[in-house]
Image: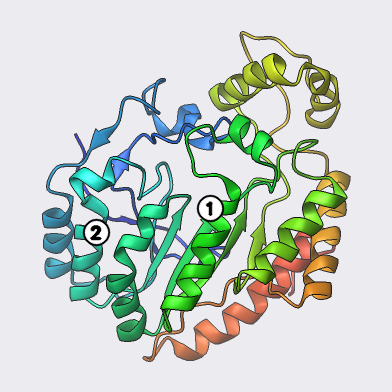
Amino acid sequence: MFKSILNKNKYIDSWFWDRYTINSYNGCQFGCVYCDARSEKYHLPTDFENDIVVKKDAALMLDKRLTNARTLLPDVVALSGTSDPYQPIEAKFKNTRQCLEVLKKHRYPVHIITKSRLVLRDLDLLEEIGKQTTWCTISITITTTNSEIARFLEKRAPLPQIRFAMIKTIKEKTENIQAGVLFIPVVPYLCDSDEILEEMVKKSKEVGADYILIAGGMTMRDLQAKWFLKHLKERYPELIERYEELYNFKYNPDFYDGDYEPTKDYIINLHKKIFALCEKYKIAYRIKRFIPQDFRKKSYLVAENLLNDAYHRQVCGSNYNLF
């Protein structure tokens, strides 16, 4: 049972620019082996790729929440988090589309994060939201250009070439939607070779992506780490020792006590490579922010510049305290 469909962040997310989040479902049928939603903090079923919770009357609850809100201001709503809003079950229940119709009614900008072709079904609605609010973004998660590796990491998701084609379609068929690639996570030793990094950036540019956003430090914790390492050992056992060094642990199938992210040197080196490639191919590595046309406009513009600078300093190992 869930009490609210709309979650308000304490602070606006400085990567995806969302103030609010919506998960149309609990659990995700794509079953990506690295998914952080398997972590204990989310309290989802262990078999969360098959045990999917459909949030009944989600759109009705959302409409009631926004209609009765006294302190909420229209700002970016991210549809994603612990589940893909366009996982296969959406074709039947349409929770995501119904929520989008409510957000359009109340004039809220939207950020869709997905791996699914089903998002193309709603381009008409998303284009209307983009035109109405001046900001609608679709981020397609792509972690590799290698189909074999993709089948290991994201066994039920569309292949990478299909997802790149989705971006091309979005950019060709719409005028008011910002669309790009989330290269998140960059999975160590499977997706971080110089060849894959360059192919990811090059292909993103070729299909017309507005940006390629990366998170070079794939996170590892509790149940999620155990699940990932179990499958890694089965498929790529030769990589376990390298992960032990990168995340500071000794493999045990019963528990994980390593670091949350890779070593600092690894993260800095990876980001510098990506940024150099983005400069080479003339593609942004940040998402353009929603700027409201009210009393918040000036502060949002200033904050966007500062946060972009802080992001670059942070991932490149510089001091990102600007004051």
Quarter occupied by residue 224: top right
Residue 178 vertical placement versus 232 (above, below) = below
Residue drawn 71% across the image and 39% down it: 187
Going by the numbered disc 2, the residue's amino acid type is: Arg
Quarter occupied by residue 239: top right
The C terminus sits in image quarter:
bottom right
Residue drawn 42% across the image and 82% down it: 176
The label nearer to you, 1 versus 2, is 1
Q: Which residue is mark 1?
A: 162
Q: Position of residue 67 (x, y in %)?
A: 12, 69
For the residues bearing labels 1 and 2, Cβ distance under 8 angstroms: no
Circle 1 SS class: helix
Note whether residue 5 is visible. Answer: no
Going by the numbered disc 1, the residue's amino acid type is: Ile
Q: Earlier in the sequence, mark 1 or mark 2?
A: 2
Dot 2, crowdedness within 10 Å: few (<14), some or many (≥20)? many
Residue drawn 61% across the image and 69% down it: 207
Q: Disc 1 versus disc 2: distance between alpha carbons?
A: 22 Å
Note whether residue 267 is visible. Answer: yes
Which mark, by number, is residue 97?
2
